[in-house]
Image (spheres, helix red, strand yellow):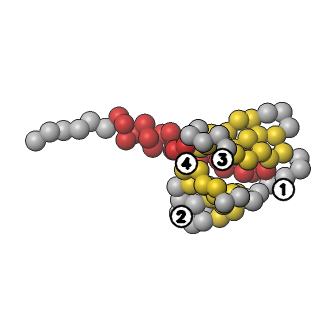
Amino acid sequence: MKFKNNEKFSVSGIEIDEDRIRFNKKEILFEDLELKQYHHHFMIFSREDNYKNRMLYYLKDKDAVILFSVLKTIIKDEHLRTKEISDRTVSGT
């Protein structure tokens, strides 16, 4: 898989890089990325800046279902990575 190899790729007009997504000259870091799922569409947006958003329709936008699944996995992995880092103990010498 390209993502696991840190290769840039694009799905449904969203460019996915090693630590962020890009669309319409906007960027959202994975740590700031959120998804909101609705019946016929979903929203990609930044927690920090609501103006960085994109709506995709499952039936209208090519590969939207695949993109949703990829982004959901990225967000889950990012949360696990962040939790692992925050759970580490700092040892003093």
Q: Look at the image and tell me whether residue 62 can be seen.
A: yes
Earlier in the chain: of badge 2 and badge 1, it is 2
Whether the residues at callouts 4 and 3 have beta carbons within 8 Å, the answer is: no
Image coordinates of residue 24 in percent, x first then y, are 71, 58
What residue is shown with label 4? 30
Numbered mark located on residue 87 in the image: none
What residue is shown with label 2? 5
The residue type indicated by label 4 comes to Phe
Numbered mark located on residue 62 in the image: 1
The residue type indicated by label 1 comes to Lys
Residue at 53 percent of width and 59 percent of height: 18
Earlier in the chain: of badge 4 and badge 1, it is 4
Whether the residues at callouts 4 and 1 have beta carbons within 8 Å, the answer is: no
The residue type indicated by label 3 comes to Lys
Residue at 77 percent of width and 45 percent of height: 55
Whether the residues at callouts 3 and 1 have beta carbons within 8 Å, the answer is: no
Q: Nearer the viewer, mark 4 or mark 3?
A: 3
Mark 4, secondary structure of its residue:
helix
Residue 2 appears in which quarter of the rendering? bottom right
Numbered mark located on residue 52 in the image: 3
Around disc 1, counting alpha carbons within 10 Å, would you say few (fewer than 14), some (14 to 19), or many (20 or more)?
some
The residue type indicated by label 2 comes to Asn
Around disc 2, counting alpha carbons within 10 Å, would you say few (fewer than 14), some (14 to 19), or many (20 or more)?
few
Around disc 3, counting alpha carbons within 10 Å, would you say few (fewer than 14), some (14 to 19), or many (20 or more)?
some
- Determine the residue located farthest toward the left in the rendered image: 93
Determine whether, in the image, residue 64 is placed left or right of residue 53: right
Residue at 45 percent of width and 43 percent of height: 81
Earlier in the chain: of badge 4 and badge 3, it is 4
Determine whether, in the image, residue 30 is placed left or right of residue 50: left
